[in-house]
Amino acid sequence: MEQANAILLLSCPDRKGLVARLSNFIFQNNGNIVHADQYTSTSSRHFFMRIEWELNGFELRREEIPMVFAPVARQYGMTWELHFTDYVPRIAIFVSRHLHCLHDLILRRDMGELPGRVEAVISNHDDARALVEQFGIPYYHFPVAPGCKAQVEQDQLALLKELGIDLVVLARYMQILSPAFVDRYVNKIINIHHSFLPAFIGGNPYQQAYDRGVKIIGATGHYVTEDLDEGPIIAQDVIEISHRDTVSDIQTKSKDLERIVLARALRLHLENKILVHESKTVVFE
């Protein structure tokens, strides 16, 4: 069994000696760094870093690390997160009637390709129940009738709290989440949008792309914010199309992209390789 590592994700205004100070913090406590990556924005002079070290032999207990590191963080004005590689995040997948991304995630989960545990699939339709339950995943049906959306969201949030969910994945969930819902899971809701944002936001980007005569189409995995389709972008990809492609052809090609991009965005989050800063992400791939 692999030994657990600690991962520190941090950002702060850039200044001399940051890398040395952080490395020294780990060295002074008998830690061995196994991965380190950093980036400095030349425009904002902001520093970003992901640093991972072995817990085996480290002199601080897990619960002691935040307390001992806090003075260093305050000294440099850091925003930071501490993670451990043996923690398995708990995931809830939200879906409506477009099931291609759900199929893909369930298969990846079944093959052990996702470093997380899918605890629930939640839908406003009952279409995917048989698919989900054959893999032993609990399925929850929350019909969304006119005038009842606020209550449905309260019930969904109560379920997510009961299940201890760490991450919500919108695998083509065709409902707009309220600001109150989003505020409960800031930078912990990942959506797949079936276009290359910021182009063709909102509904039916396939038709928009066809009408505009574009030569490439894309898919975007991003964090959800209160502003529709404007959250920090995690992963994107594109594929070529031509004048011969119908709207249906574009949709088929886009579905392939959506599967790949959503899985990539989800994996990057689960592996703690993303730092969100203002409206952007720094991704340590």
Image (cartoon, rainbow, N blue to C red):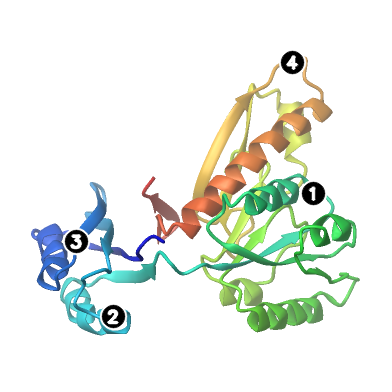
Q: Secondary structure at mark 4?
A: loop
Q: Mark 3 sits on what residue? A: 32
Q: Earlier in the sequence, mark 3 or mark 4?
A: 3
Amino acid type, callout 1: Leu
Instruction: Please tell me how crowded label 3 is: few (under 14), some (14-19), or many (20+) other residues with Cα within 10 Å.
Output: some
**How far apart are the two marked residues, 4 and 1, measured between alpha carbons?**
27 Å
Q: Earlier in the sequence, mark 2 or mark 3?
A: 3
In front of the other: label 4 or label 2? Answer: 2
Q: Mark 1 sits on what residue? A: 99
Q: Secondary structure at mark 3?
A: loop
- Whether residue 198 sits left or right of residue 65 in the image: it is right
In front of the other: label 1 or label 3? Answer: 3
What residue is rendered at 38% in x and 68% in y? 84
Answer yes or no: do the residues labelled 2 and 3 have beta carbons within 8 Å?
A: no
Q: Which mark is residue 66?
A: 2
What residue is rendered at 54% in x and 40% in y? 236
Q: Mark 4 sits on what residue? A: 243
In front of the other: label 3 or label 4? Answer: 3
Amino acid type, callout 3: Asn
Instruction: Please tell me how crowded label 1 is: few (under 14), some (14-19), or many (20+) other residues with Cα within 10 Å.
Output: some
